[in-house]
Amino acid sequence: MNTRQTGLPPKQGLYDPQYERDACGMGFVANIAGIKSNTVIRRALTVLENMEHRGGQGSEPNTGDGAGIMIQIPHRFFRREMAALGVTLPEEGDYAVGMLFMPHDQAQREEQERTFEAIVREEGQDVLGWRTVPTNDELLGRSAKEAKPYVRQLFIGRGAGTEAGLAFERKLYVIRKRAERAIRYADFPGGDRFYVSSLSCRKIVYKGMLTTEQLKSFYPELTDETMETAIALVHSRFSTNTFPSWDRAHPYRYLIHNGEINTLRGNINWMHARQTLLASELFGDDIEKVKPIIDADGSDTAMFDNVLELLYLAGRPLAHAAMMMVPEPWTNHESMSPEKRAFYEYHSTPGTVGRPRRDGVHGRRADRRDPRPERTPPRALLRDEGRLHHPRFGAGRARDSAGGDSVQGPAPSGTGAAGRHEGRPDHFRRGSEEGDRDRASLPRVAG
């Protein structure tokens, strides 16, 4: 019976889990033509292995603080693997894959799977099947082995009433949040061992309490020639004065992070205070199912990821949401364009950070020295029939359910930058639902 603690210790003595921080190494590999191959994964794993100095180990050199990789859904690989299990997968994009950490106890695991399946069906989606992920713990240290989860994959087909693309991603987000609340954060047998690394029709995360060299050996399928992607993010975790765990390894669902977030508590409090006002045309009544937005047991980066995920799925291009949460120091920036200054003034969230992030289609990066997320309440939360509300600038039109194409907020009075541009800076205009393609750092990936 595995009795090793898998999460963080409780508050005791001089230790308080709310001060968990980490400083890590990260890498990003892509085929700029959008051509998927296993070569991208192999090169990303080489990058990861060369970041050993950016990762941490404890008293056991073979127990790492964490390592992981995010890739696009490898359709050719999964089609072959699931066919061997008697499951025919739909076309790429019409199914999702959940990467789950679960308890080793079979009875507990099966009960969790039944609960997860029930939620999937209640949300109008199809359960296609389960797959056990082959793992090899031969190189793992004792601590990592004792805390090792049972790794499973759940395949979910897009329901007839759900549109493809981001509408499907939003529904998967609702399913995951409901499952977490019903299993991980409830009095559920083995619930503390339940964790969803990723649940998406676009991307998947392989990670764990590993060293940089162990990721490839622990998940042997990463080197299968049919395991293909055009974009890969890798991360090596160094948990500064904190406790490593399997679920706190990066990547998270939308980003990886290098550094510490220093303005955390105030932003968490603001999110909790304001989430009761959340409403969205795109989420509709489902918005109530995703609360609380922030997972209280997550790391600083995990909590940032929680909010970025919401802003993106609520209708903003990924670049837009990231610029809201990771703004440049714009106030006294003499060479910044008036349009960009107006964008930041509208959102009024000064700060800096270094975080590559991915939605499974685009990659984008901001690289600053001092990680510092927004210091004021998030301004991108949709309410009142999809209109943006800002305490200074009033209301502006947000994207409608059909993917409307602009935000038109009234300008403030006076001679501020937003006023000079009548509240409609170019950087604030909407892109299509697939994201802000014109300003993405990489071209759209085929398939």
Image (tube, rainbow, N blue to C red):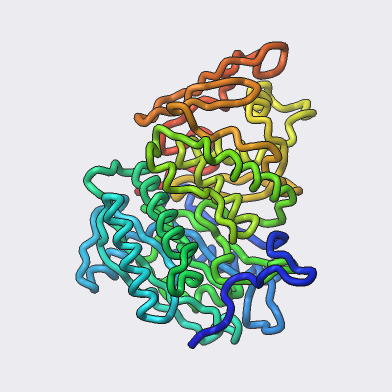
Q: Position of residue 77 (x, y in %)?
A: 33, 66
Q: In which image quadrant can residue 385 be found?
A: top left
Q: Is residue 430 above or below residue 1?
A: above
Task: Count the marks.
Answer: 0
Q: In which image quadrant can residue 199 be found?
A: bottom left
Q: Position of residue 103 (x, y in %)?
A: 44, 76
Q: Front-most of 193 and 239?
A: 193
Could you tell whether 32 is left or right of 400 in the image?
right
Q: Is residue 49 visible?
A: no
Could you tell whether 207 is left or right of 22 in the image?
left
Q: Is residue 414 above or below residue 268?
A: above
Q: Residue drawn 59% across and 67% down?
A: 48
Q: Position of residue 236 (x, y in %)?
A: 62, 66
Q: Is residue 338 above or below residue 445?
A: above
Q: Residue drawn 57% across and 62% down?
A: 250
Could you tell whether 65 is left or right of 176 in the image?
right
Q: Is residue 224 above or below residue 383?
A: below
Q: Residue drawn 42% across and 61% down?
A: 182
Q: Front-most of 140 and 299?
A: 299
Q: Is residue 162 visible?
A: yes
Q: Front-most of 364 and 196?
A: 196
